[in-house]
Amino acid sequence: MVRKLHPHIAKDLRDFLAENNISTKKLVIDLETETIEDFDDYSVDDILSVAGILKPGEAQELLDHIQESREGWGK
Protein backbone atom coordinates (compact mmCIF):
# COMPACT_ATOMS: atom_id res chain seq x y z
CA MET A 1 0.00 0.00 0.00
CA VAL A 2 1.35 3.42 -0.93
CA ARG A 3 0.80 6.31 1.45
CA LYS A 4 1.63 9.98 0.98
CA LEU A 5 4.16 11.41 3.44
CA HIS A 6 3.68 14.73 5.18
CA PRO A 7 6.16 17.22 3.62
CA HIS A 8 7.97 17.75 6.95
CA ILE A 9 8.44 14.00 7.42
CA ALA A 10 9.70 13.64 3.84
CA LYS A 11 12.23 16.43 4.44
CA ASP A 12 13.40 14.86 7.70
CA LEU A 13 13.83 11.51 5.95
CA ARG A 14 15.82 13.11 3.12
CA ASP A 15 18.06 14.84 5.68
CA PHE A 16 18.59 11.56 7.55
CA LEU A 17 19.43 9.71 4.33
CA ALA A 18 21.84 12.43 3.23
CA GLU A 19 23.59 12.32 6.62
CA ASN A 20 24.03 8.57 6.17
CA ASN A 21 25.27 8.82 2.55
CA ILE A 22 22.21 7.08 1.12
CA SER A 23 21.28 8.53 -2.27
CA THR A 24 18.87 5.90 -3.56
CA LYS A 25 15.44 7.32 -4.40
CA LYS A 26 13.50 4.17 -3.47
CA LEU A 27 14.15 2.22 -0.28
CA VAL A 28 12.69 -0.57 1.77
CA ILE A 29 12.71 0.28 5.47
CA ASP A 30 12.26 -2.77 7.68
CA LEU A 31 11.52 -1.67 11.22
CA GLU A 32 11.52 -5.24 12.50
CA THR A 33 15.11 -5.91 11.44
CA GLU A 34 16.06 -2.21 11.69
CA THR A 35 17.52 -2.13 8.18
CA ILE A 36 17.32 0.08 5.08
CA GLU A 37 17.66 -1.66 1.72
CA ASP A 38 18.16 -0.07 -1.70
CA PHE A 39 15.23 -0.79 -3.96
CA ASP A 40 16.81 -1.12 -7.40
CA ASP A 41 14.88 -1.51 -10.62
CA TYR A 42 15.55 -4.80 -12.31
CA SER A 43 16.37 -5.04 -15.99
CA VAL A 44 15.34 -7.66 -18.52
CA ASP A 45 18.82 -9.18 -18.11
CA ASP A 46 18.15 -9.74 -14.42
CA ILE A 47 14.90 -11.49 -15.21
CA LEU A 48 16.44 -13.51 -18.03
CA SER A 49 19.17 -14.73 -15.68
CA VAL A 50 16.52 -17.04 -14.24
CA ALA A 51 15.30 -18.04 -17.71
CA GLY A 52 15.99 -21.68 -16.97
CA ILE A 53 13.00 -21.72 -14.65
CA LEU A 54 10.73 -19.60 -16.83
CA LYS A 55 8.73 -20.81 -19.80
CA PRO A 56 9.13 -18.97 -23.13
CA GLY A 57 7.48 -15.54 -22.95
CA GLU A 58 7.16 -15.56 -19.16
CA ALA A 59 10.15 -13.24 -18.66
CA GLN A 60 8.51 -10.49 -20.73
CA GLU A 61 5.16 -11.06 -19.00
CA LEU A 62 6.88 -10.76 -15.64
CA LEU A 63 8.67 -7.58 -16.70
CA ASP A 64 5.40 -6.08 -17.99
CA HIS A 65 3.66 -6.93 -14.72
CA ILE A 66 6.45 -5.35 -12.66
CA GLN A 67 6.38 -2.20 -14.78
CA GLU A 68 2.57 -1.90 -14.45
CA SER A 69 2.83 -2.36 -10.70
CA ARG A 70 5.37 0.45 -10.43
CA GLU A 71 3.48 2.99 -12.56
CA GLY A 72 1.61 4.39 -9.56
CA TRP A 73 4.69 4.80 -7.36
CA GLY A 74 5.78 8.30 -6.53
CA LYS A 75 2.49 9.95 -7.36
Image (cartoon, rainbow, N blue to C red):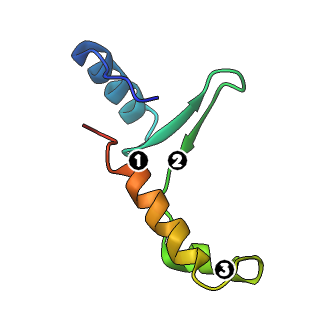
Q: Residue type at mark 1: give it.
A: Thr
Which residue matches tag 2? Answer: 38
Residue at position x 52%, y 47% from top?
Answer: 38
Q: Earlier in the sequence, mark 2 or mark 3?
A: 2
Q: Residue type at mark 3: give it.
A: Ser
The reply to whether dot 1 and dot 3 touch (C-beta < 8 Å) is no
The reply to whether dot 2 and dot 1 touch (C-beta < 8 Å) is yes
Circle on res. 46:
none
Q: Left or right: where does residue 6 sit relative to residue 16?
A: left
Whole-percent x, y for residue 71 in the image? 32, 50
Element assignment for label 3: loop
Circle on res. 24:
1
Q: Earlier in the sequence, mark 2 or mark 1?
A: 1
Element assignment for label 1: loop
Q: Left or right: where does residue 10 sit relative to residue 69?
A: left
Residue at position x 52%, y 71% from top?
Answer: 61
Give the CA separation, mark 2 to mark 3. 20 Å
Which residue matches tag 3? Answer: 49
Whole-percent x, y for residue 34 in the image? 66, 25
Answer whether residue 41 is visible to the viewer in this image.
no
Q: Residue type at mark 2: give it.
A: Asp
User: Where 46 falls versus 8 (above or below)?
Assistant: below
User: Where 53 falls versus 38 (above or below)?
Assistant: below
Q: Earlier in the sequence, mark 1 or mark 3?
A: 1
Whole-percent x, y for residue 12 in the image? 33, 19
Quarter occupied by the C terminus: top left
User: Where 44 falls versus 36 (above or below)?
Assistant: below
